[in-house]
Amino acid sequence: MQQEIMEAVKKAKELSRPRNFTQSMDVILNIKDLDVNKPENRFDEEVSLPNGRGKDVKIAVIADGELALQAKNAGADLVITKDELEELGKNRKEAKKLANSYEFFVAQADMMPLVGRFLGPVLGPRKKMPKPVPATINPEPILKKLRDTVKVRIKDQPVVHTVVGTEDMDDEKLAENIEAVLQTIDRKLEKGRNQLKSMYVKTTMGPVVRVI
């Protein structure tokens, strides 16, 4: 299947009109014989792409003291202190804006009750509740891994649609990233990739190209 994926990726790039930004490359998987009304058939997995996402994702860290300082030094896009967290709790509009602007959240473990109280109502529905980490941890490896991570989820439709890189990445590397997504499907579905009804790749604004 690797060859078919690479050919489809190449074709998707060729069919995509040039834009004034680097487009993402997406994969769309339609699943058959899956009842999404059953909770056990829905999932929300984080997949680390072997060749990265091709562009930066924004990560916010909720922490105080030493961890806040380390997170800043490790390149976190935003560090939210305890006081700032409480302020966000009073400003729902600002909290929603924050939830939409950042892809991943990491929080100092002992601050999680406050996070749940002040940001839970906006982060929970968006499936963006933070990963709790100890106050003593070095956040750099965590942030590095998250920058290469995508969400692979099935919610109310038997469809997975996720980013697998950018159009300027090598075809083979994009195919390897798609394989990492397919391995998650193998793990999460009873019949694995045999349950794929169809599979497409596309650039952000380009047409879909069928793989299978």
Image: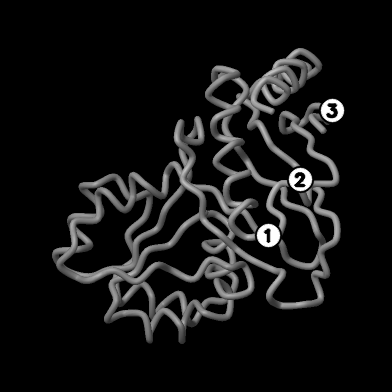
Circle 3 crowding by C-alpha within 10 Å: few under 14, some 14–19, many from 20:
some
Looking at numbered disc 2 in the image, what kind of residue is underneath it?
Answer: Leu
Res 177 quadrant in image: top right
Vertical relation: 194 (above or below) 62: above
Looking at numbered disc 3 in the image, what kind of residue is underneath it?
Answer: Pro
The reply to whether dot 3 and dot 1 touch (C-beta < 8 Å) is no
Q: Nearer the viewer, residue 37 or 19?
A: 37
The reply to whether dot 3 and dot 2 touch (C-beta < 8 Å) is no
Q: Which residue corresponds to the image point at 28% horizontal and 72% vertical from the top-left?
A: 108
Side (left or right) of 211 relative to 68 = right
Q: Which residue corresponds to the image point at 80% horizontal and 59% vertical from the top-left?
A: 158
Disc 1: which residue: 189
Of discs 3 and 1, which sits in the foreground? 1
Side (left or right) of 75 relative to 22 = left
Side (left or right) of 35 relative to 79 = right
Disc 2: which residue: 29
Residue 28 x, y percent position in the rendering = 75, 42
The N terminus sits in image quarter: top right
Circle 1 crowding by C-alpha within 10 Å: few under 14, some 14–19, many from 20:
some
Looking at numbered disc 1 in the image, what kind of residue is underneath it?
Answer: Leu
Disc 3: which residue: 207
Q: Nearer the viewer, residue 31 or 167?
A: 31
How many angstroms separate mark 2 from mark 1 (CA)? 13 Å
Secondary structure, mark 3, is loop
